Image (spheres, rainbow, N blue to C red):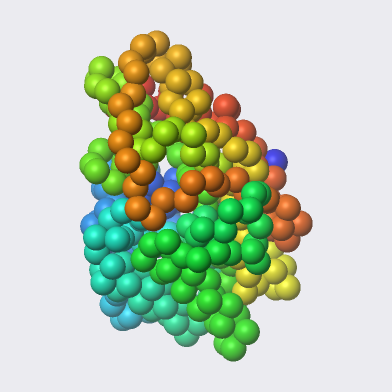
Amino acid sequence: MGYKHLSFAPGTVFLVTGGAGFIGSNLCEAILDMGYTVRCLDDFSTGKRENLATFQDNPRLTVIEGDIRNLDTCLEACTGADFVLHQAAWGSVPRSIEMPLLYEEINSKGTLNMMEAARQAGIKKFVYASSSAVYGDDPALPKTEGREGRLLSPYALTKRVNEEYGRLYSELYGLETYGLRYFNVFGRRQDPNGPYAAVIPKFVAQLLRGETPTIHGDGRQSRDFTYVDNVVEANLKACQASSEAAGQSYNIANGAQEFLLDVYYELCRALHKEIEPEFAPDRPGDIKHSNADITKAREWLNYDPEFDFAGGLKLAIDWYRGNLC
């Protein structure tokens, strides 16, 4: 289980786009801890320099400040790298509904730039972040690759476009691409602030401040919350996957189902708070229920998530306590 036993050739260079973001910074840190070289490409529009603070002086880390919407920047970053872990994107379904043109530019055009740069640079494997949002309004549970519904947001559309480009770049150009459909990732360094913050860190920060959190909907919506170290594992194992697994997308989750209201009260218990939440209308574009079948990732990527929800939540709360107080 996990990723710490994995090994790559000496001198292997990983390019992590969005490396100053939540998931990207965890990838950078893990790869450096394993003894390999990391290039972090980020324009710091959503990524934060403080996410790199604990390892910014590592001589095997190079930080490139640049925008994936610029093809020349992508080409420069890819040159001499072995693997690309493409995390750079703008998240948030509600924000994408407000700013569809920006999401098209960053998430779709930016990812296409990165794939083209990787192709020209002879990258061995191109691993990129997709999303459970691609399942849209398909009501079936668990969510299974190949059974997608009608898309509900511009964000979801950009991720579906990424997957189609990934398939084409594998089939037409021989670039081995691997799409990872993340399911509600949480953990250290996830930003709790702002109107588009993810629900777990936002609830924790509000509870620690004694504020009353707001739940959109009735709280009976469900999610497959996934601890960030499981996502790190999936990225690194995709770098060792077979060529036959390329050009496809894979669910990256726990394969479990947690109801939001239950998660909220679990956080209250862990933080010793007794605060009843407020309720607000459902948010446009949100999927009601999300629970992943991770069979395909287990079989093709050797994905074996080390942390279940309870174990990941304990680690996350410990980090939040030390860093949000």
Asked which quadrant contains residue 254, the reply is top right
| Residue for point 27% across, 23% down | 212
* Residue 1 horizontal/vertical position (percent): 70, 41
* Residue 41 horizontal/vertical position (percent): 34, 62
Asked which quadrant contains residue 10, the reply is bottom right
| Residue for point 34% across, 47% down | 283
Q: Is residue 306 left or right of residue 227?
A: right
Determine if residue 77 is in view.
Answer: no
Residues 278 and 294: in front is 278
Residues 93 and 8: in front is 93
* Residue 152 horizontal/vertical position (percent): 42, 61
Q: Is residue 211 left or right of residue 247?
A: left
* Residue 30 horizontal/vertical position (percent): 50, 46
Asked which quadrant contains residue 235, the reply is bottom right
Determine if residue 45 is in view.
Answer: yes
Query: In the displayed structure, would residue 8 be above or below residue 273?
Result: below
Q: Quadrant of the C terminus?
A: top left
* Residue farthest to the bottom, as pictured: 172
Q: Is residue 171 left or right of residue 314?
A: right
Residues 193 and 217: in front is 217
| Residue for point 23% across, 42% down | 194
| Residue for point 55% across, 82% down | 169
* Residue farthest to the right, as pictured: 299
Residues 238 and 110: in front is 110
